[in-house]
Amino acid sequence: MKLHIQNDTPWRTADVRAIVSGACRAVAARHRKRVRVVNARTMRLSGYATLGSRRFEAAHVTLRVPSPTVIRKALASEVGTWVDSLIRALYEPSDPALAKDWAGPQYVAPAWGYTGSGNERVLPYLYRRIEVAADSALRLPARLAALAVHELLHSQGAQHADMTKAQRACEIAVPWAAELPLRAQSRRAGPDRHALVERRAAHARAMHARALRRLRLARTLEAKWRARVRYYARREKAS
């Protein structure tokens, strides 16, 4: 089976290919597949595929995967929310008369100390959100593999009603993907400005020298044909 990967994400194409190839083997795909991987705007993975049939196995599949930047922002947001709620739980006064003068996080405990303003009740929930976001980031290869299996089943003609609950929810067990890496591509170093200027200056000098040679040749040809014109002008007058 031929597999064409169009990777429009910062993840390494070789890692994406390994995950999608494993998904193809898991569903016993037989025909050529064209899989496009694009960036997702949130931590949620999604995708779509051309619906196949028993006689025709569709080729086109698209997968949406969060980029490293999206993952970093999501984790930073969850951690920031938790820290802000923690500070409020520790330092925000519960007395409305005092709360209206509370200007924000205070890293020195006020005179009233810990008052239990009610924010402490949401801390376990917020911390659980951090755990979920971190777990989603760590299990990204397995989540991508489960999504690929789901969409490849669609390409083979399977509807949601034909799938198991785990397949439908993209929660199928994919132990073969647990050890597969999904690494970000290394950033290419920018061009050396000094070397770039030198290279372009050398090119400009070469082109100028070429233009001068053409100019000298043009002058020589012009002088040759000017003399030929004068010669035939004299012949015409003599005749």
Image: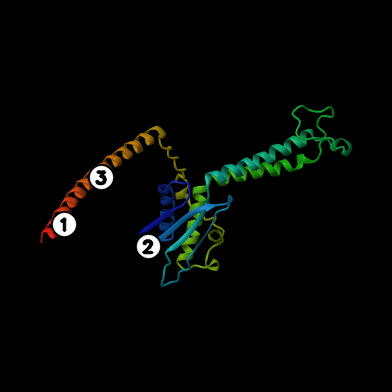
Q: Secondary structure at mark 3?
A: helix
The residue lying at 77 percent from left, 33 percent from top is 90
The one of 161 and 221 positioned closer to us in this rendering: 221
Q: Amino acid at mark 3?
A: Leu
- The residue that disc 3 covers is 215
Q: Amino acid at mark 1?
A: Ala
- The residue that disc 1 covers is 233
Label 1 CA crowd tier, 10 Å (few <14, some 14–19, many 20+):
few
Say whether marks 3 and 1 touch (CB < 8 Å): no
* Location of residue 56 with respect to 201 vertically, above or below: below
- The residue that disc 2 covers is 32
The residue lying at 45 percent from left, 57 percent from top is 36
Which residue ends up furthest to the left in the rendered image? 239
Mark 1–mark 2 Cα distance, whole angstroms, equals 76 Å
Task: Mark 2 vs mark 3: give the one in front.
Answer: 3
Q: Earlier in the sequence, mark 2 or mark 3?
A: 2
Question: How is the structure coloured here?
Answer: rainbow
Q: Amino acid at mark 2?
A: Arg
Say whether marks 1 and 2 touch (CB < 8 Å): no
Which residue ends up furthest to the right in the rendered image? 97
Q: Earlier in the sequence, mark 3 or mark 1?
A: 3
* Location of residue 223 with respect to 111 vertically, above or below: below
The residue lying at 65 percent from left, 42 percent from top is 78
Image location (x, y in percent) of residue 112: 84, 29
The one of 212 and 79 positioned closer to us in this rendering: 212
The residue lying at 55 percent from left, 54 percent from top is 45
Image location (x, y in percent) of residue 121: 76, 42
Mark 2–mark 3 Cα distance, whole angstroms, equals 58 Å
Q: Secondary structure at mark 2?
A: loop
Mark 3–mark 1 Cα distance, whole angstroms, equals 27 Å
